[in-house]
Image: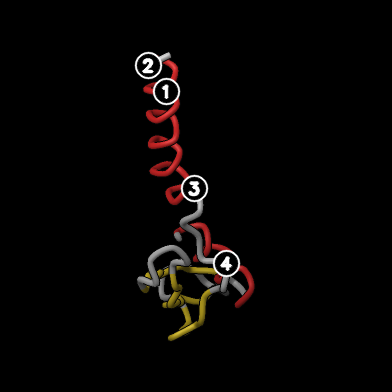
Amino acid sequence: MKIVIGSTLLLCAVAMVAVPVFADTCSTGCNIQTKKASASKKGQFDYTLSCIRDSSGDELIAKVTAATDAAAKALALKQC
C-alpha cells in the first residue's frame, strides 16, 4: 500500500511540473512592432514582433522575414 501511495504522489508531482511546460504558448497572438523592406530577400520584409507568453506573462521579441503580415505573425508564434 505504501508503494502505491508513493508512486501515485510521484506521478502527480511529475504531472504538475509537465503540464505548464506544454501550455507555454502565445495564444493571444503577436503584435508587429516594426516592418521594413528586407535587404537580403527581395519582395519580403523584416519584422520585429512582440508576443506575450500565456503561462508567465513574459514578452518575447521575435525577428522574422516574411512576405506578408500574416506569415510574419505565424512565424513569430512558432518561436513562442
Q: How far apart are marks 4 and 2 (CA)?
A: 42 Å
* Neighbours of disc 3 within 10 Å: few (<14), some (14-19), many (20+): few
Q: Mark 2 points at which residue?
A: 2
> With respect to residue 2, does 10 lie above or below?
below
Q: Mark 1 points at which residue?
A: 5
- Contact (Cβ within 8 Å) of mark 1 with mark 2: yes
Q: Distance between the residues labelled 3 and 1?
A: 26 Å
Q: How far apart are marks 1 and 2 (CA)?
A: 5 Å
Q: Which amino acid does label 4 sit on?
A: Ser
In depth, the one of 66 and 76 nearer the eye is 76
Earlier sequence position, callout 4 versus callout 3: 3
Q: What residue type is labelled 2?
A: Lys
Mark 4 or 2: in front is 2
Label 4: state its secondary structure: loop
Give the residue furthest to the front.
1
Label 1: state its secondary structure: helix
Earlier sequence position, callout 4 versus callout 1: 1
In depth, the one of 74 and 10 nearer the eye is 10
Q: Mark 3 points at which residue?
A: 22
Q: Mark 4 points at which residue?
A: 27
In depth, the one of 30 and 8 nearer the eye is 8
Label 3: state its secondary structure: helix
Q: Who's the residue at 52% across and 63% down the image?
A: 77
Q: What residue type is labelled 1?
A: Ile
